[in-house]
Image: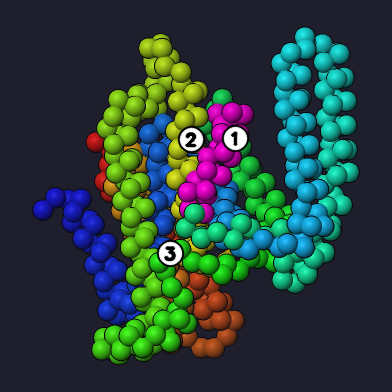
């Protein structure tokens, strides 16, 4: 049996033990989390493992995928569209036209004072016109029943259509970021992508007309063919099956829904792995690794390094956007406040590093292992700390240790990362 197969079997045993010792519901929840994280890790692996691009803005692309779900699945708010929808669209069109006109003017006018003055006049005038049209429309939309809506709503389409759209939104953002930031040095690129991701989250939090901001969007749709638990609990056939298997209706319906989600995620994950492997082993993949290892030599051979970097940056970001849409569909809610760098950027990076950057199967293994550790330690940390402090006298020290148990997962994550870097610096499944 190969080493790689043994590693995957070992991780599989961790999930099996979770189901046997804790609950199958929790095991499936962690498994689905790991599978979605594996898709995100594959996107990061494309950027870093193939091309050496240090992207620390993963959470921004994941958030755009979640936003796609809200824009597709939620029903449109008719009254909001009547009072301000056209004004918002017109204001956005004015903003885009101003930027496009500024770019064209900068390219066509000769360098000098006149160009600077013309640019200043264009941008100031365009900004004032934009605010004059946009602000009243936003105020009118956000005043429409703000406790429930206060936004334009979405298209009212099946949420499954939002998964590819999440990839498209993330790819569009990656193109805009790449055109400006990919010429920077790697450390500057990392700072730029992290800053832009924070800007994306800030826009989602504060522009209530878009997706209710921090008031959150409850998604009433689910991907076909995932039913709602409450509907299963009223189905006589399902109730009989759950009783035969020894599950109560609530637990059985939750497990069934998670199993259906797992099957759908596995289809997407399998497709992404297949395409990634095909790309990695193609002439394009060999070219990307050559650029990663020595950009100067690749340029000397006639390769357009910046264009290839932009290409792989867009592809990786699109994969992250699809994963973000899947995760929001599972959660059933869009909350911009949950998009934190620790969860949606640096945890994914740990998965790639532990698994083995440059190896697609390594990224999947790292995602499953670290995803399991991240959630199981959170669940067992307070219980373990309770056992450790059982013999201590009641007091502030014991209370502090018990309250700090949730941080044990950070300690565990750090220890695992240090051990892997010490004994397997290239990851558990290194790049060939």
Please name the residue shown 57% across and 85% down the image: 395
Q: Reply above or below: 34 against 91.
A: below
**Distance from label 3 to label 2 (Cα)?**
30 Å
Query: Which of the two residues, 265 or 407, is positioned nearer the viewer here?
Result: 265
Q: Which mark is residue 224?
A: 3
Q: Is residue 410 rendered to the left or right of residue 98?
A: left
Let me know if residue 66 is in the magenta part. Answer: no
Query: Which of the two residues, 340 or 167, is positioned nearer the viewer here?
Result: 167
**Disc 2 packing (10 Å; few <14; some 14–19; many ≥20):** many
Which residues make up the magenta segment? 162-182
Sequence-wise, which precedes: disc 1 or disc 3? 1
Q: Reply above or below: 98 against 241.
A: above
Q: Main secondary structure of the magenta part?
A: helix
Could you say whether the residue bearing mark 1 is in a helix, strand or loop? helix
Please name the residue shown 49% across and 73% down the image: 405
Residue with the mark numbered 1: 177
Please name the residue shown 27% across and 74% down the image: 17
**Residue 20 in view of the camera:** yes
Could you say whether the residue bearing mark 3 is in a helix, strand or loop? loop
Please name the residue shown 55% across and 76% down the image: 403
**Count of labels shown?**
3
Where in the figure is residue 201, as x and y percent of width and height? 65, 52
Q: Reply above or below: 173 against 158.
A: above
Q: Which mark is residue 313?
A: 2
Mark 2 vs 1: CB contact within 8 A:
yes
**Distance from label 2 to label 1 (Cα)?**
9 Å
Where in the figure is residue 208, as x and y percent of width and height? 73, 58
């Amino acid at each position: 049996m190969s080493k790689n197969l043994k590693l995957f079997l070992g991780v599989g045993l961790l999930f099996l033990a979770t189901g046997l010792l804790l609950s199958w519901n929790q095991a499936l929840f962690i498994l689905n989390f790991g599978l979605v994280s594996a898709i995100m890790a594959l996107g990061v692996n494309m950027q870093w493992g193939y091309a050496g691009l240090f992207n620390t803005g993963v959470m921004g692309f994941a958030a755009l995928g979640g936003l796609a779900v809200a824009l597709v699945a939620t029903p449109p708010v008719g009254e909001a569209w009547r009072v301000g929808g056209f004004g918002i669209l017109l204001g956005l069109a004015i903003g885009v036209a101003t930027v496009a006109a500024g770019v064209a003017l900068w390219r066509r006018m000769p360098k000098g004072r006149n160009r600077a003055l013309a640019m200043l006049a264009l941008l100031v005038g365009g900004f004032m016109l934009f605010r004059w049209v946009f602000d009243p429309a936003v105020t009118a939309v956000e005043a429409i029943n703000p406790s429930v809506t206060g936004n334009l709503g979405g298209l009212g389409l099946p949420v499954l259509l939002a998964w590819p759209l999440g990839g498209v939104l993330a790819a569009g953002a990656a193109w805009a970021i790449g055109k400006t930031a990919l010429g920077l040095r790697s450390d500057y690129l990392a700072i730029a992508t992290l800053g832009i991701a924070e800007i994306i989250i800030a826009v989602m939090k504060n522009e209530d007309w878009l997706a209710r901001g921090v008031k959150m969007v409850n998604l009433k749709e689910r991907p076909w063919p995932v039913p709602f638990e409450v509907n299963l609990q009223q189905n006589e056939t399902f109730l009989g099956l759950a009783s035969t298997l020894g599950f109560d209706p609530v637990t059985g319906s939750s497990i069934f829904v998670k199993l259906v989600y797992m099957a759908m995620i596995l289809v997407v994950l399998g497709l992404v792995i297949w395409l990634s492997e095909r790309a990695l082993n193609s002439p394009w993949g060999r070219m990307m690794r050559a650029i990663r290892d020595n950009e100067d030599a690749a340029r000397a051979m006639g390769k357009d390094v910046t264009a290839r970097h932009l290409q792989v940056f867009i592809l990786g970001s699109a994969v992250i956007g699809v994963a973000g849409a899947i995760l929001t569909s599972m959660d059933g809610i869009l909350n911009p406040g949950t998009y934190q760098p620790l969860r949606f950027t640096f945890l994914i990076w740990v998965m790639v590093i532990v698994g083995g950057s440059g190896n697609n199967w390594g990224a999947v293994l790292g995602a499953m292992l670290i995803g399991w550790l991240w959630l199981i330690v959170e669940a067992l940390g307070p219980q373990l700390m309770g056992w450790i402090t059982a013999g201590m006298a009641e007091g502030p020290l014991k209370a502090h240790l018990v309250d700090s148990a949730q941080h044990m997962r950070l300690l565990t994550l750090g220890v695992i990362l240090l051990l892997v870097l010490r004994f397997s610096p290239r990851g558990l499944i290194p790049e060939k």
